[in-house]
Image: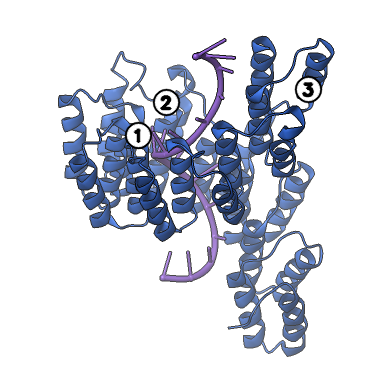
Chain colours: A blue, B purple
Amino acid sequence: LQTHNHLLDVLVKSGDLSSTEGVLQAMLEEGCVPNLVTFNILVRGYTKAGDLQQATLLFHGLKKYGLEPDVWMLNFMLQGFFKQGKVADALKLFQEVDENLPDIFSFNIVVNGLCRSGKAGQAWEVVETMKARGLAPDTVTYNTLISSLYKANRMSDARRIFQEMSEAGVQPDVLTCNILVSGACKDGNMDEAYRIVDAMEQQGLSPNSVTYNTLIDGLCKAGRVVEACQVASWLSTQKDNAVRPNVVTYNTLVDGLCKSRMLVDALTLVADMPAQKVLPDSVTYTALINGLCRGGELKSALKLLLGTLEKGYIPDAVTYISLVDGLCKGGETEGADQLVSEMEERGHDTGSVVLSCLVSGYCRSGNLVRAAEVLSKSVRARRCVPSWVSCDLVLQSMQKARMWDEASELLSQLVEVGYEPP
RNA sequence: AGCUUUUCCUGCACCC
């Protein structure tokens, strides 16, 4: 049984759900009765793949095997719902189950899910519930809450909760400190960020690469790119692999250099990556492509993408979008159109982001007919719901150009998909 | 009993 469970876990972790059915069959044929762990592994697999229907079926189908869902399965389901943005489903399940079932993990998942979907108020209610049930918020709970407050720019609230955490005797860990560092950076307080890193070292909470990457990103965003590079080169003198520069470190610097218009340095840095045994990934390429486009080097950006394709690299949607946007902004709307077709051929979703790039590109170049065409084509194909902002843009541009008939025709199409004119 | 679950860092349009 353990062997089979382990096998299933490996399959699920490698994303190979289709093979799990065979393993399950084999188990049954061998007279090996699946237990809760078996089903938990499967449910986790389905939730990770976004197939919540299948997961729900398993969840409710357990009774056939004389089993009841346990906390583990509840937690997988909750996490799955939240990851898919199905907050209501998650909450429904959470309220349905026996009051004694949820554990600290369940609560932390719910708190995190609510925070991430912008429902901070409800998250706090859940924290109160957990306290009422005798479960004290732990380090993970506080890390979640503090991080979400910082992300919402609620700096003083974040500091207050950190204070509360200390008063409650809950020990901060490295993650807590990393969150505090990123908060200080976001607040523009780099001195404080440095102080926290120093304090970590003194308290035996060794900063890791996330800590330093956060600091480096903060420096870049504060316009202190040179200093950021200095921190990174100091890191590369370290023996400890836990702090040596990794791909995120490089990506952070590449983006920082690009945004500070230090394109040559960015390109040099990327060229040096393989020698440092760190390989560029799609984030690296996207940052560079954006930098090149903003610097008016459309040709080089396009070349870069083609070069990665030749190396067998498969660009992700964000990389494509960046180039599409760059081409649009540079007036190369035909090239952008072509690239979008290529994205489609490669099976990428060309969603509302691509659409708004194209639409604003065409509006900018005065080709309103084409802008409306692209917009209505994708609405009719129900490919995606366009962002209302780009709808406003086209309609307003059309009105300015006195294209009343075209505007009203487009408007009626957009209204059907839920658009409300301003 | 054991095996499976939660929180931290980097890239994209429009809006701000």
Q: Is residue A265 left or right of residue A364?
A: left
The residue drawn where x is 49% and y is 20% is: A274
> Which amino acid does the dot numbered 3 rest on?
Ser
Q: In this picture, is A309 found above or below A408?
A: above
| Chain of the residue that carries numbered disc 1 in the rendered image | A
Tell me which chain the residue with mark 2 is part of. A
- Residue A5 falls left or right of residue A64: left
Q: Is residue A268 visible?
A: no
Image mark count: 3
Comes first in the chain, label 2 or label 3: 3
- Count neighbours of disc 1 (C-alpha within 10 A) and say few if under 14, some if 14 to 19, many if 20 or more: many
Classify residue A174 as left or right of residue A89: left
- Residue A246's label in the rendered image is 2
Residue identifier under label 1 = A213
Tell me the SS state at disc 2: loop
- Gap between marks 2 and 3 measured at Cα: 34 Å
**Lower sequence index among marks 2 and 1:** 1
Q: Position of residue A410 (x, y in %)?
A: 75, 79
Viewport quadrant of the N terminus of chain A: top right
Disc 1 element: helix
Residue placed most toward the observer, A202 or A193? A202
Residue marked by disc 3: A19
**Marks 2 and 3: which is nearer the front?**
3
Measuring 28% from the left and 17% from the top, which residue is drawn there?
A238
Q: Are marks 2 and 1 in contact (CB under 8 Å)?
A: yes
